[in-house]
Amino acid sequence: MKGNSSCKICVFTFLYGLGLLLFAAGLVIYLLAPGLINDQVAKTIPLNDDPNSQTFKAWLNPPATINMQFWLFDVQNPNDVINGAKPIVKDIGPFTYRESRIKENVTFYKNGSVSYKEIKQFNFIPEESIYNESHIITTLNLPLVVIAEKIKNYPNLLKRLIDAGVRFIDKSLFIQKSINEIVFGYEDPLLEDVE
């Protein structure tokens, strides 16, 4: 029995010592690790004008690719809608573009700041798109809809004048534009006249 008791004391002492050792190690790591990690990050991350640094290379030409996909509604029966029918729309897509960002005129200053001009380019990816970006769709003429919404509370005479102006420049509730024009914009004579 006595041997069994001394064995328990040995195991207890060993576990107690091991616990104290692990506690001390944890405390040291808790106190020192943030400083070590911050030092390592400070050595690796700062952006400077060294063209050989990994950070500068990754910042100047990001390794990640950014793809954007668009789905659009193509109105199948625009003339019927103008005459009061319910629109029939076809959801088409994806139309995929890859975004690339080019940094120009990069200048580093003594105070640690940097200035540059970033140019975004969007390149069409035909193999990831359902049609070519020159594909024409029929869609709602949003500038005309916005103008109609804006003038709905105008006096009737003014509404008739604006309506006559819209008819004069031959604007319809629907327009036919390419995918590229719909996604990235186009010159609209109606908006040019408003400006």
Image (cartoon, helix red, strand yellow):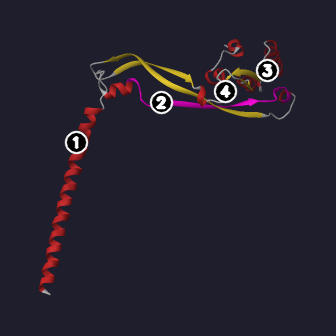
> Which numbered disc, 4 or 1, marks the residue that appears first in the sequence?
1
**Is residue 35 shown above or below 119?**
below
**Label 3 belongs to which residue?**
172
Tag 1: residue type? Leu
Q: Looking at the rendering, which quadrant does residue 188 occupy?
A: top right
Q: CA distance from mark 2 to mark 4?
A: 22 Å
Q: Residue 10: percent from the left, percent from the top?
A: 14, 74
**Label 4 belongs to which residue?**
131
In-front residue for pair 153/144: 144
Label for residue 36? Answer: 1
Q: Residue 190: percent from the left, percent from the top?
A: 72, 15
Element at badge 4?
A: loop
Element at badge 1?
A: helix
View extreme (front): residue: 127
Q: CA distance from mark 2 to mark 1?
A: 32 Å
Residue extent of the magenta highlight: 60-80
Front of the two marks 4 and 1: 4
> Which numbered disc, 4 or 3, marks the residue that appears first in the sequence?
4
Tag 4: residue type? Tyr
Mark 1 neighbour class, 10 Å CA radius: few under 14, some 14 to 19, many 20 or more: few
Q: Residue 152: percent from the left, percent from the top?
A: 77, 26
> Which numbered disc, 1 or 3, marks the residue that appears first in the sequence?
1
Locate the C terminus and report the quarter of the image it occupies: top right
Tag 3: residue type? Ser
Asked if residue 4 lies left or right of residue 97, the reply is: left
In-front residue for pair 106/133: 133
Q: Looking at the rendering, which quadrant does residue 143 occupy?
A: top right
Residue occupying image coordinates x 84% and y 26%: 79
In-front residue for pair 133/21: 133
Residue occupying image coordinates x 34% and y 21%: 114
Mark 4 neighbour class, 10 Å CA radius: few under 14, some 14 to 19, many 20 or more: some
